[in-house]
Image (tube, grey):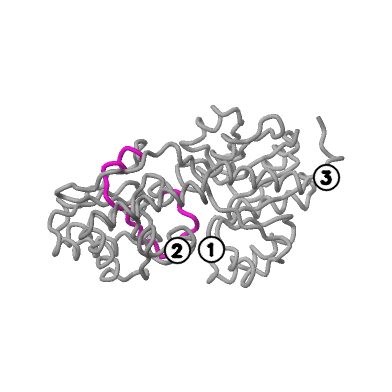
Amino acid sequence: MIRVTHLVLSLETGGLENVVLNLVRHADRERFAERVVCLRGPGALAPLVEAEGAPVIALRSSGRLPTLRALLAELQVGSPHVLHAHNPLPHQFGAMAKLLRRTQVLVHTKHGRNAPEDRIAVAINRLCSRATDMVVPVSENAADVARRIERVPERKLLVIHNGIETERFTPVTRSDRAEPRGICVARLDAVKDIPSLLEAVARVRQACPGFRVDLVGDGPDRERIEATRTRLGLDAAVTLLGKRSDVSALLQKADLFLLASISEGISLTLLEAMAAGLPIVATAVGGNREVVVDGETGFLVPSRQPDAFADAVCRLLKSPELRLQMGAAARRRAESHFDVRTMTSRYQELYLRLVAPTRIAP
């Protein structure tokens, strides 16, 4: 039995956290025993993880040294064969734990670009990678940052795309609503650039006055987004729904999915929209270019260019047939390239390859 400990900041709702939940949920329980350690509080997804049989331990320490001490004590108890750190700060603590021999193997999943313009962050990532057995970027774009900027050796890089439970989403099969509706599911954070999306919506409504958009999610940028919505006269056209647990049902009520991020890894909400059979309009940044096939499953446009975004939306609104065609292609691509079982299998194969069989205790 291989013991795997996932190291995260917390299990608050988000893409990274849902990846951890899915890795736990779909693990081969005859070969792997999993647990999750949160450097901070447990978060909203902790009960779901525990319901899958994986203990969740929240360290709740303040300050780096107390946090490190608490982590080392927990790893002494859990004695993992694999410590799997997710994103930069957990990676830093994971690297220290590996150097202090509290785990046999350290794996780091790089869920995005991780501030390649920040020289200090790059230097820290580079140092931590030296103690890491494998760095797993979730996209080729993130791998390029690791390779060129953080100087991670090629032998330590393995791209594993995120995956979702595609069967949870029923494809949209009609697109004849009198007032077509777009949807964006994203954390209300500056990196998602919702204000540019709203600018595009205002332009679209000049040609299609009945067009409406649902924004699903919450976050620190909400106040600025509400102010932008009011300034553009979109209060009646754009609904902020906050965090929701019924995203799959909301996707069924939409005709297209919108994502205006200025940086992105492999967005789980984008994958979910594709699984729901929605055509996509997204910015050509990060992992979006590996998910959306431009002109086949949707349209990719430059970031921070509301006019280009609006033009792509209008092309889809003018043609219900094109929306259905692209939506069906999106569903097929989600099933064939981004299924959760493929993702989990690749991680488990990696664990098995890295852990020396002679060192696995019963």
Q: Secondary structure at mark 1?
A: loop
Nearer-the-camera pick, 152 or 72: 152
- The amino acid beneath tag 3 is Ala
Q: Which residue is mark 1?
A: 113
Instruction: Please tell me which residue is depicted at 22% across the width and 50% down the height of the picture.
Output: 181
Outermost residue, right side: 358
Horizontally, residue 60 falls left or right of residue 316, namely right
- The amino acid beneath tag 1 is Arg
Magenta highlight range: 248-269
Q: Position of residue 192 (x, y in %)?
A: 38, 59
Q: Earlier in the sequence, mark 2 or mark 3?
A: 2
Q: Quadrant of residue 125?
A: bottom right
Instruction: Please tell me which residue is depicted at 73% across the width and 39% down the height of the picture.
Output: 80
Q: Quadrant of residue 303?
A: bottom left
Q: Quadrant of residue 8?
A: top right
Nearer-the-camera pick, 145 or 41: 145
Residue 89 part of the magenta segment: no
Q: Earlier in the sequence, mark 1 or mark 3?
A: 1
Q: Which residue is mark 3?
A: 356
Q: Nearer the viewer, mark 2 or mark 3?
A: 3
Instruction: Please tell me which residue is depicted at 26% across the width and 59% down the height of the picture.
Output: 316
Q: CA distance from mark 1 to mark 3?
A: 31 Å
CB atoms at circles 2 and 1 under 8 Å apart?
A: yes
Q: Earlier in the sequence, mark 2 or mark 1?
A: 1
Q: Position of residue 121 (x, y in %)?
A: 59, 65
Q: Nearer the viewer, mark 1 or mark 3?
A: 3
Q: Secondary structure at mark 2?
A: loop
Q: Quadrant of the C terminus?
A: top right
Q: Position of residue 212 (x, y in %)?
A: 19, 52
Residue 263 shows which numbered tag? 2
- The amino acid beneath tag 2 is Ser
Q: Position of residue 342 (x, y in %)?
A: 58, 45
